[in-house]
Image (tube, rainbow, N blue to C red):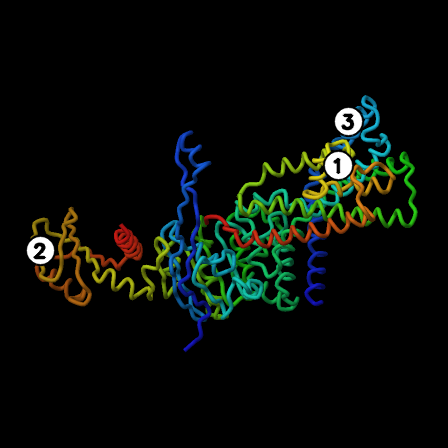
Amino acid sequence: MKTLSRYGLMAMTLLKINIQRGLEYPAHLIGWLISNPLQFIFGLITIKVVISNFQALGGWSFEQTVFLYGLGIISHGLSVVLFIQTWYMGFLITEGELDRMLVRPLNVFFQFCFFDFNFIGLTDMLPGIIIFTYGCMAASFQFTLANTLNLLLALVGATALRGGLYTIIGALSFWIQRSRQLIGVQWKLFDYSAKYPMNIYPPIVQGIFTFLLPIGFICFYPASQLLYANAGFALPGNLCLWTFAVGIGFYMLGMMVFKIGLRWYESCGS
Amino acid sequence: MQSAVILANNLSKEFITTKKSSGLRGAVKNLFKPEKTVKRAVDHVSFEITKGEIVGYIGPNGAGKSTTIKMMCGILNPTGGNVLINGMSPVNQRQKIVMDLGVVFGQRSQLYWDLPLGESFELLRRIYLVDRAKYEANLAELDRILNVHEFIDTPVRQLSLGQRMRGDLAAAMLHSPSVLFLDEPTIGLDVDVKYAIRKFIKEINEKYQTTVILTTHDLDDIQALCKRIIIINDGIIVSDSPLEELIEQELGHRLLIVELSAGDFHVTHPKAEITPLGSNRLQLKFRKDEISAAALISDISAQYQIRDLQIKEADINDVIRQIYARSKAACL
């Protein structure tokens, strides 16, 4: 209990410091505020073009796809705020940056997650919220109590799932030293799987993205349930709850891989 | 008998590296059949350090100094053997040990790059659970020697190397650790800052009985601070003894250099080895235990008139070079 409150206090302090640190570079902040929404608006245009030329994607209308896309960007934004460090893990490892964390009397994974809390990532959230709100209205999503709860479960789950997967891929750097290329693959993968309904892909691909590398849970499965849209595979139970469970599970798996990897950590020459 | 603050027992660390063959053919070969070589950076190192000691841990580049330090403060896990800090092992009690440890790496700051120094200190205060009153007192004390208040509101990235290093040292001592690891703390610093840092180390050692382990290439640091030095080369400890003893045993001799007024001379002495240095100057190499410098000078001045003289004490640089060379020869 004492440790928990200590870590809680520590997290608050770090949050404050990181916001302060983010404001040290106002130009940087403004740059992201402009460039990030642009990126997603182009994403939206792509979807519009694809759908208006090829009709509905796997039974999903444009409005439903916007809902899906918006949901994906929100959890993307949250994960960028919370887990962006995982993208630089290769750098942290080869440059011996973890040394600093290892000589501090705090859990290393905690330090890893919170010392570089990326408040700039909130700029990713903004377009996400706008696109999602539009998607909600266009696809006439009902904010009933059950729907809202399911949506929250799905968002928490999707964010944790992204975090877990990023951590696992990043932690591979403990063994292969360099995971930069993998990050690129990860990006593409997440981009394609979160932008389009997954049931447009062949069943084998759907299978991989459901059972092996469950990125289908990031937004496709929860959105299909929330909008009563085609989910491809008929999975049993509440898909939003599944997303939550899979997310927490993968996050814990990520923590474990990180912990095992840390034993392999070789620092770097003086 | 004081108990050991640090106890290393057959401590070893191996790194596996793949040998790279050159050329395209080599690159293809590396891909399919990598040749792995095991490099022992630290090889069965054992020593015991008691409370309040300042120990110089020296060796040429790549000798295994930093690797040893990193194992002691829990950054690296040993491949073999073990090390105990205050009776605990960094492998399974890392957090508990580092609570009472200060670490400074000269080559890498432990401070937070974008934060003003003071914010870094405040953060460290929370990390190490130092209460406010104690923190203020510690900071005032550290400031007295290191003058950190001059730049306490400057972001760390804007500090000069000397300021940064002073900041790093203060940061390492804020929680009054009982053991301080300093890995090349004076690297690249000017004379003034070096002096301030030496003074700082000396004071905290005297005042708080802080145990200090210092690695450096600047042997003046060693001479100014350490009573004991451990020399490591190729991962093996080649010498572990008090500084004076080491100099004594390595260089039992001293040098007397005399300048004579007469141009025409022929000096011989049964207890000194004489080399002419030109322009009326002579170098006499003699052993302390065979003849005193005074006796030698009076023997010579009985024959010739001495215009000037100079006695050279053993130079620690020579001692160290000699030891490095010998341990290298032993390896071959």
Measured as percent of width and height from the top left, residue B227 is found at 37, 66
Within-10-Å neighbours for mark 2: few <14, some 14–19, many 20+: few
Query: Is B329 left or right of A224, judged from the image as shown?
Result: left
- Depth check, front residue: B290 or A105: A105
Which residue is under mark 1? A194
Query: Which mark is drawn over residue B267?
Result: 2
Secondary structure found at label 3: helix
B10 sits left or right of A144 in the view: left
- Identify the residue at image location x=30%, y=57%: B316
Q: Nearer the viewer, mark 1 or mark 2?
A: 1
Camera-nearest residue between B134 and B63: B63
For disc 3, the marked residue is A46
Work out how far the residue at label 1 is from the one at label 2, CA to CA, in angstroms: 94 Å
Q: CA distance from mark 3 to mark 1?
A: 13 Å
Task: Check disc 3: other Cα within 10 Å, few if <14, some if 14-19, many if 20+.
Answer: few
Pointer 1 indicates a residue of which chain?
A
Q: Residues within 10 Å of mark 1 (few under 14, many from 20)?
A: many
User: Which element carries disc 2, helix, strand or loop?
Assistant: loop
Q: Quadrant of residue B8?
A: bottom left
Q: Looking at the image, can residue B145 be seen?
A: yes
Three-letter code for the amino acid on which mark 2 is drawn: Val
Amino acid type assigned to the residue bearing label 3 in the image? Thr
Is residue A11 left or right of B83 when viewed as pictured?
A: right
Chain containing mark 3? A
User: Helix, strand, or loop for circle 1?
Assistant: helix
Q: Position of residue A4 (x, y in %)?
A: 70, 63
Q: Quadrant of residue A2?
A: bottom right
Task: Give the Cα distance between marks 3 and 2.
Answer: 98 Å
